[in-house]
Image (cartoon, rainbow, N blue to C red):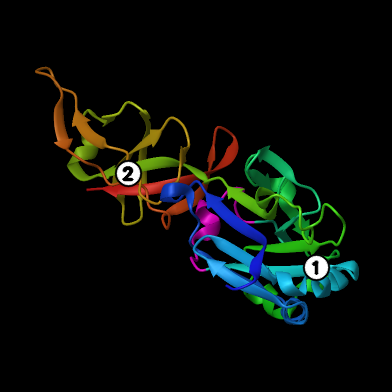
Amino acid sequence: MGTYRPLFSITVEHAYFSGHSCKMLEFVPTSSSTAMLRNAGLLLKSSESGVAVYFDHGNIDILRLHAADNLTLTFKVFAKDPNFLRYTAPGAPPDQAILFFNNRAINRDDPDKQLLHGGATVAEDSWADMAVEPLASILDRKDLLIKPAFILQMNITADAQGLCSDKLDPAARKFFIRFGANQTFWNYYVLGELSKRAIYIADLDNAVQFKSIGNVTLPGQREALVLQSSVAIPMQEHSRYRLQLRESGNMGDKVLIKRLPNASVDQTFSEMINGKMENVSEIFVN
């Protein structure tokens, strides 16, 4: 890239994806930020899991002049996957709220990870009111129809420790946003004759247990036995649970289904469990 050097980079990590690389986001600079990028001679480059901005070292004095006059780059970040908020903790924001990150307060998780949120992963404290500044000036009517997954704002200062410094360590230019995966209780609905037998679910890796929570009547007057996980299970892009449906008998247990299907993101609902609203994934077994 010639004399261009990294000014800063943002990498998004996500526990849902294999390798934790979040591949479902698009970083869109606001119109004012697009003008700032051009006027300050900055280059914007998207990566598989984030975005990076580069500056022309030969024209660093121009960048410093802009930084001395409050250079702030703002990005609306959209999820390409409509299910993104289903598998992302802390889940869908409340009405009139959106996730908001900036580099004014850095959480140094380890020497090489500068997090743009307070905890080890994004939590409810990253929600911000859309009607309050700075979000009120960033968002427009179109964003109310297609809501960004989050807003990112990077402040570039001209002080000795800021991003315009020649002496800044490369690691200090790298910033991270780390999402945890939402968790769901898995409900297996066993229909037909199987529901009347002494069945249970066995995990070949002994990582999770299931219990019977009784029979229910589904639409169409179909009876089903519900087997529910004892704990909520983190969602994964490629779930590796090896679950079997077995039947207890006098002559020993028998395997009825060698490999049960795992939960799907698009079959997730809210349900009251132990007096609390929880995410529940429904899987139907005939």
The quarter holding residue 78 reads bottom right
Give, as a single range, the part of the protein colored magenta: 80-92
Q: In x, y percent, where is residue 248?
A: 18, 24
Q: Residue at x 37, y 48 (%)?
A: 263
Badge 1: few (under 14), some or many (20 or more) residues near its Cα, within 10 Å?
A: some
Identify the residue position indicated by label 2 in the image. 189
Amino acid, disc 1: Thr
Question: Which residue is rendered at x = 78% and y = 72% of the image?
Answer: 138
Q: Which residue has dot 1 on it?
A: 72
**Residue 226's image quarter?**
top left
User: Is residue 166 shown left or right of residue 86?
Assistant: right
Does 90 lie within the magenta span? Answer: yes
Query: Could you say whether the residue bearing mark 1 is in a helix, strand or loop?
Result: strand
Disc 2 crowd rating (10 Å Cα; few below 14, some 14-19, many 20+) is many
In the rendered structure, the answer to whether residue 224 lies left or right of residue 48 reads: left
Return the mark for residue 196: none
Q: Between residues 264 and 211, which one lies in front from this camera angle?
A: 264
Q: Using residue 148 as the reference point, say whether residue 243 is left or right of it.
A: left
For residue 6, which quarter of the picture?
bottom right
Numbered disc 2: secondary structure: strand
The one nearer the camera, 231 or 59, is 59
Q: 98 or 192: nearer the eye?
A: 98
Q: Is residue 140 above or below residue 24?
A: below
